[in-house]
Image (cartoon, rainbow, N blue to C red):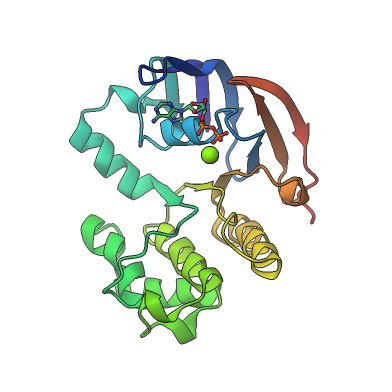
Amino acid sequence: MIEVRNLTKHYKFGNVTALKGINLTFEDGKFYTIAGASGSGKTTLLNILSGIDSPTSGEVIVDGLRIHSLKEKELRRYRLENFGIVFQFFYLVPYLTGLENVLLPIKYSKKVKNPEERARKLLKLVNAEHLANKLPEHMSGGEMQRIAIARALANRPKYLFADEPTANLDWENKLRIWNLLQKIKEEEGVTVIAATHEREFFRFADVVITLRDGEVHEVNDGNGKA
Ligand SMILES: Nc1ncnc2c1ncn2[C@@H]1O[C@H](COP(=O)(O)OP(=O)(O)O)[C@@H](O)[C@H]1O
Ligand SMILES: [Mg+2]
């Protein structure tokens, strides 16, 4: 479970208060969508939840642990073992194959016993077995994102964060990725927290949290049965 208490974020650059006192609870095994217009604070919130960025004030408590109180090195290890993160622009390592990209976090953490077996299982889960030996430059956007999702799941994280994971994809691939995220929630049991401004995909979530101008505007059911 992730608890967010009185979270604020002020950016000195531009003198912007991007989060103005956010309180939220994320329960295990559910699919959350963070919605809201561009500039509403979705990326800022996700980056603080996933430990990429730190808050100005307030707390993020993950399974009882105040993650922003950890030392940098401890936080890095915690993230590696417990969080998977997916980005809009995929960020695959360009000189590594699909399989090698998925293996990378496993090699860093040593949490998983049979790296190759785990990586191949994940390639299968995301329908990308045929990309095992291909370099990213020979993959489509949808294929790169499927590899990035497999990589994010490599160390069996409890939480998967995704920031506008389909903003760069065509319609067919957008649907494929949202369906895949939902399947992952079910088959891997991860809690999914995904930001999108695209209303068409809210139906994949169990809970839709809408931000407006740095505040929680509303919390609704998606229907989670898309
Ligand atoms: N690194 C940054 N430095 C300064 N201002 C930022 C930074 N990142 C975001 N902002 C500002 O914070 C607000 C929220 O941005 P963001 O979290 O990116 O929203 P969203 O992801 O919903 O589009 C915006 O006003 C944006 O300009
Ligand atoms: Mg954003």
Frontmost residue, 13 versus 145: 13
The percent position of residue 143, horizontal first and vertical second, equals 51, 73
Q: Left of 97 or right of it: where is 10?
A: right
Q: Quadrant of residue 10?
A: top left
Q: Quadrant of residue 127?
A: bottom right
Q: Residue furthest front?
A: 14
The percent position of residue 62, horizontal first and vertical second, equals 44, 31
Q: Left of 220 or right of it: where is 33?
A: left
User: Residue at left 63%, top 58%?
Assistant: 186
Quadrant location of the C terminus in the rendered image: bottom right
Count the numbered circles shown: 0
The percent position of residue 96, horizontal first and vertical second, equals 28, 74
Residue 52 position (above or below residue 64) = below
Frontmost residue, 94 versus 190: 94
User: Residue at left 73%, top 51%?
Assistant: 201
Q: Left of 116 or right of it: where is 189?
A: right
Residue 47 position (above or below residue 30) = above
Frontmost residue, 175 versus 167: 167
Residue 118 position (above or below residue 178) = below
User: Residue at left 56%, top 59%?
Assistant: 168
The percent position of residue 146, horizontal first and vertical second, equals 51, 68
